[in-house]
Amino acid sequence: MKKIIFILSGIALLLTLVSFGFYGVSKMIYNSCSCEQFNIDNIELRTGINIPSIKNTECIYDEITKTKKATFLIDTEKVDLEAYILKNKLVKSDYGELYVKSNNIKSHSYQGVLNKKIGKLNVEINFKD
């Protein structure tokens, strides 16, 4: 009986440590504002916009204004833009082939704009914290 309790306690401790590990990594990614480390993951967590297979990316982070601006050239040979627009809940704007997703919450505001014609996604995040 003591062995079973010892084994179950060990398993519970291991699962707790793994859970805290995942939580810690996700917080680190969420709080990473720079363009260097975890850039795509940070953008995906903050905006809810999935960054698909890309050909090229550019990113600038301004520490003074706490603003990150990233541009992604989507590989349209690998990504179906119609399905991408639906999956990421992008809304067609009044300006041609542009699709937008934006929000303003307590910790940050963001705007993602996809130019469907050329497969270019521009994301701007303004960090408030």
Image (cartoon, rainbow, N blue to C red):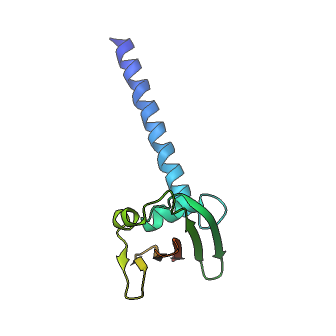
Q: Position of residue 66 (x, y in %)?
A: 59, 78
Q: Residue at x 38, y 84 (%)?
A: 93
- Where 89 falls versus 93 (above or below)? above
Q: Position of residue 5 (x, y in %)?
A: 35, 19
Which residue is more in the foreground, 49 or 35? 49
Q: Residue at x 65, y 81 (%)?
A: 64
Residue 55 in view, yes or no:
yes
**Quadrant location of the N terminus?**
top left
Q: Is residue 119 left or right of residue 38?
A: left
Q: Residue at x 38, y 68 (%)?
A: 85
Q: Is residue 75 left or right of residue 107?
A: right
Q: Quadrant of residue 95?
A: bottom left
Which residue is more in the foreground, 17 or 126? 126
Q: Where is residue 3 in the image (x, y as percent from the top left)?
A: 39, 12
Q: In which quarter of the image is residue 97?
A: bottom left
* Residue that sits furthest to the bottom in the current view: 94
- Where 82 falls versus 117 (above or below)? above
* Residue that sits furthest to the front in the current view: 77
Which residue is more in the foreground, 45 or 91? 91
